[in-house]
Amino acid sequence: MVIDCHGHYTTAPKQLQAFRDEQIAALKSSAGAPPKVLASITDDQLRESVQPQLKFQTDRGTDLTIFSPRASAMAHHIGDATTSLDWTRHCNDLIHRVCTLFPDNFVGVCQLPQTPSAPLANCVEELERCVNEFGFIGCNLNPDPSGGHWTAPPLTDRFWYPFYEKMVELDVPAMVHVSASCNPNFHATGAHYLNADTTAFMQFLQADLFKDFPTLRMIIPHGGGAVPYHWGRYRGLAQDMKRPLLTDLIRDNVFFDTCVYHQPGIDLLLKVVPVENILFGSEMVGAVRGVDPQTGHYYDDTKRYVDAAAIDADARSRILEGNTRRVYPRINRLLE
Amino acid sequence: MVIDCHGHYTTAPKQLQAFRDEQIAALKSSAGAPPKVLASITDDQLRESVQPQLKFQTDRGTDLTIFSPRASAMAHHIGDATTSLDWTRHCNDLIHRVCTLFPDNFVGVCQLPQTPSAPLANCVEELERCVNEFGFIGCNLNPDPSGGHWTAPPLTDRFWYPFYEKMVELDVPAMVHVSASCNPNFHATGAHYLNADTTAFMQFLQADLFKDFPTLRMIIPHGGGAVPYHWGRYRGLAQDMKRPLLTDLIRDNVFFDTCVYHQPGIDLLLKVVPVENILFGSEMVGAVRGVDPQTGHYYDDTKRYVDAAAIDADARSRILEGNTRRVYPRINRLLE
């Protein structure tokens, strides 16, 4: 079995974006309250909407996608806690419906109703709802709900601890994933995403978060941002700072996906990062949608790169399935 | 000849930091004006201070270091334009003195008196002073003078154009280099530096800056941040955005140094980025100061990685010397 740990519902029916547009329009005017109810979406519309993902699964030889709402649309910087909660619940509800319609193809991961500088109580409740009621197996945690202004405390700050306690209790991991950028310096998928990945890793290196939460698990997407390319720099920084070896520091707690869109990048990742800490992911249908003229294949068909990499069958199997079952253990209940 | 394009004066005599400490202390209290004059530093003290750099040059087989003030100490977010100008001039004066004492070993690049949201007039003047009076060959340009809050406009914004006009007129390039971070999310050398590199590259990809300034040259340090590792992602993003091919986009304008502290990283860089766009650099004495137990050599002895890479002699010669002479043409006058 091949599990893709990183897929977003970027192809949701247009009613979802219409709700969001209305919600944002209401925030900007005094002409009435924002909507609460999402316009009706039929099961057929949902089935139709995920045909691109199902086709890619078939074409690329992957089986199951860990599926979450569109990351760039989370936009936690818009509105307040109520805005974020209303939007988040609709997004998660749709993921649940898709997973229910296609239980062999999709398993859910939730968006969180984060909002800048507000406490995380809403997030704890939404995580419980999605895990306990919907059978979701993880969440996407935004380290920068401000959308590029980076006003939240680092992920190792006690601000986040109540949420981590719930993650540990439910035995679900988080993918550290920012959303849209409202800072003109940062292109979302070309800078903000990768910067957040790099930033999160360094935060984990600096502090003892995983001593406080030995079973807390974080996936750093997009191949770990800049980290594997600068593995020597990070080994050296850890050494200068008298921190543990990187391999010990990340062992049971920090994982990278394979959303790196060319063979040399994947080869580097597999060479420097322990195989136990790598989960197959493609981010399809996501940031890069074209076909690479150098290969004739989609840039984000990352399974091709993993298949072509110089690793043995055991390593490949761990990356494509085993590690993901270990990091997202609730998936095993669904696959029995 | 081997030219290291990236060295900072991290070993300056203690009088320099004492000046800065006094300056910052004065900003925080009402007990008098900040100092204007740097305490006397003798030539012998300067000679003594750069012995580590000279020893590394000898040990590693490099000849000349393009030498600039300590990047993390620029701290443009502290104080106002006057604070920044006073501090910057002292830093640049010392670089000039070191380069005068060791003209075969060091050539100067200047810090700029940037300050958040102020116009760049001060910077134009300081660049002229350093190039015309001191014979400096370039500058370090900070894309985020706020120190981690990213409040300045993107590097492609017209805000920066008066400064670029002066760079073009003087025929000097800029290394895009942030400084210390006052945002607790960003470790300076472990996150902020690499994020800035990644961010700058994506800004260049999004806009037509180099159509407006065909001879403007920017060096992105630290091996280009996350960019070479994600070269496929950037090729794909450029394609989706209908932008030029990356190789065309960077050809005469954007360059990466080799400050990547392990062999697999350098191998990736040399594999994906055109050799014409790579300049040898080590950042010594810099961010990572230890010896790699896996190799028995300093992490930042990047010449070893370049020497060991699978490239031909012509490519190696361009990276170690030729490209740098092309990007910093004023160096040729000094080496005649």
Image (cartoon, coloured by chain):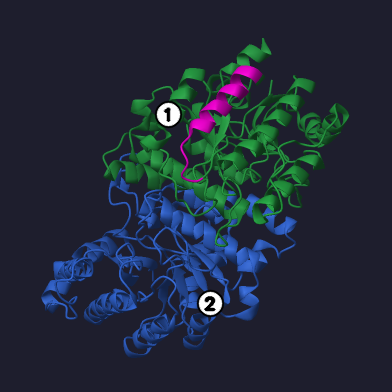
Chain colours: A green, B blue
Give the vertical position of A228 relative to A214 (above or below): below
Q: In the image shown, does A223 or B36 lie closer to the viewer?
A: B36
Q: In the image shown, does A104 or B97 lie closer to the viewer?
A: A104
Do marks 1 and 2 both belong to one polypeptide chain?
no
The picture places residue B235, in percent across and down from the top left corner, at: 67, 55
The picture places residue B184, in percent across and down from the top left corner, at: 37, 49
Give the letter of the chain under mark 1: A
Assign the N terminus of chain B to one quadrant of the image: bottom left
What range of the chain is rendered magenta?
A: A116-133
Give the letter of the chain under mark 2: B
For the stretch drawn in magenta, the main secondary structure is: helix
| Circle 1: residue type | Pro
Does the magenta run of residues contain A123?
A: yes
Assign the C terminus of chain B to one quadrant of the image: bottom left
Depth-wise, is mark 1 or mark 2 nearer the camera? Answer: 1
The picture places residue A234, in percent across and down from the top left corner, at: 39, 44
Q: Tag 1: Cα neighbours inside 10 Å, few (<14), some, or many (≥20)?
A: some
Please, what secondary structure does the residue beneath circle 2 have? Answer: helix
Q: Is residue B161 left or right of residue A72?
A: left
Which residue occupies 31% across, 34% down?
A244
| Circle 2: residue type | Phe
Tell me the number on the disc at residue A162: 1
Q: In the image shown, does A234 or B100 lie closer to the viewer?
A: A234
Please, what secondary structure does the residue beneath circle 1 have? Answer: helix
> Which quarter of the picture shows residue B57?
bottom left
Does the magenta run of residues contain B211?
A: no
Which residue occupies 69% across, 45% down?
A34
Tell me the number on the disc at residue B254: none
Residue assigned mark 2: B159
Q: What is the CA distance from the residue labelled 1 to the residue labelled 2?
A: 43 Å
Give the vertical position of A35 relative to B216 (above or below): above
